[in-house]
Amino acid sequence: PSNPPALDPATDPKKDKKEKKEVSEGKEEKAQGADEEKEKKTGRNPARPAPERVSSGFRPTKAWIQAWHRKLPLETVLRLLDFLVPKFNSTTSSMNVTTTNELLDVIRNTTLVGVLPAPHKIVVNKYVANKVTTSWFSTFLWGVVYLRNSSLYSRDAVKLFPIYEVNDEDEDEY
């Protein structure tokens, strides 16, 4: 077997790829530096797309945000944070808790009894029959019977008909 001919460094394809890679890496670094400069000046990262504006041009005002904030049910979350944040701060400083697992152990061993508000009472509403609910339930029940027993009859021969309940008092009207 003969040795391959020595390649001229000017025509070496590997060298050409290395040079192209170095040039592209240099361009990326320059672009990244320029992006960082723009981000410092404008407060926005140009690599990330700008948030889309709503076509109506709506921009929330401070008053609007405060009005919504008052409506949000944050009482439980705020109580939880008021209790846990000081506890975590004291625990992390006194016990030298540094890892996530150690902090999770602190959370697991913390009781929230008496911190959170009492849960709402469970209200049980009893079913009260009326004509509408009875009709719905009857229709639903017969629909289930029809669909689950379709092997007992021919689907083409089924005819729907209404069923009326007649009271003794109503018989005279017919």
Image (cartoon, grey):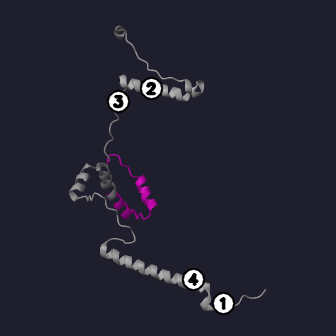
Residue at left offset 44%, top offset 80% = 29
Please report the bounds of the magenta region as a residue range. Answer: 86-115
Residue 5 placement (x, y as % from top left): 71, 90
Q: Distance between the residues labelled 2 and 1?
A: 88 Å
Q: Mark 1 points at which residue?
A: 7
- Nearer the camera: disc 3 or disc 2: 2
Q: Residue 47 at what x, y percent from top left? A: 40, 71
Q: Residue at the location (51% across, 83% down)? A: 22
Q: What element carries label 1?
A: loop
The quadrant in which residue 65 appears is bottom left
Crowd rating for badge 4 (residues with CA inside 10 Å; few <14, some 14–19, many 20+): few
Sequence-wise, which precedes: disc 2 or disc 4? 4
Q: In this view, does 14 lie above or below 155?
A: below
Instruction: Reply above or below: 150 against 111.
Output: above
Q: Which of marks 3 and 4 is nearer the N terminus?
A: 4
Q: In this figure, which residue is indicated by the disc labeled 4?
A: 17
As drawn, the label of residue 139 is 2
Q: Mark 3 points at which residue?
A: 125
Distance between the Cα atoms at labels 3 and 1?
Answer: 90 Å
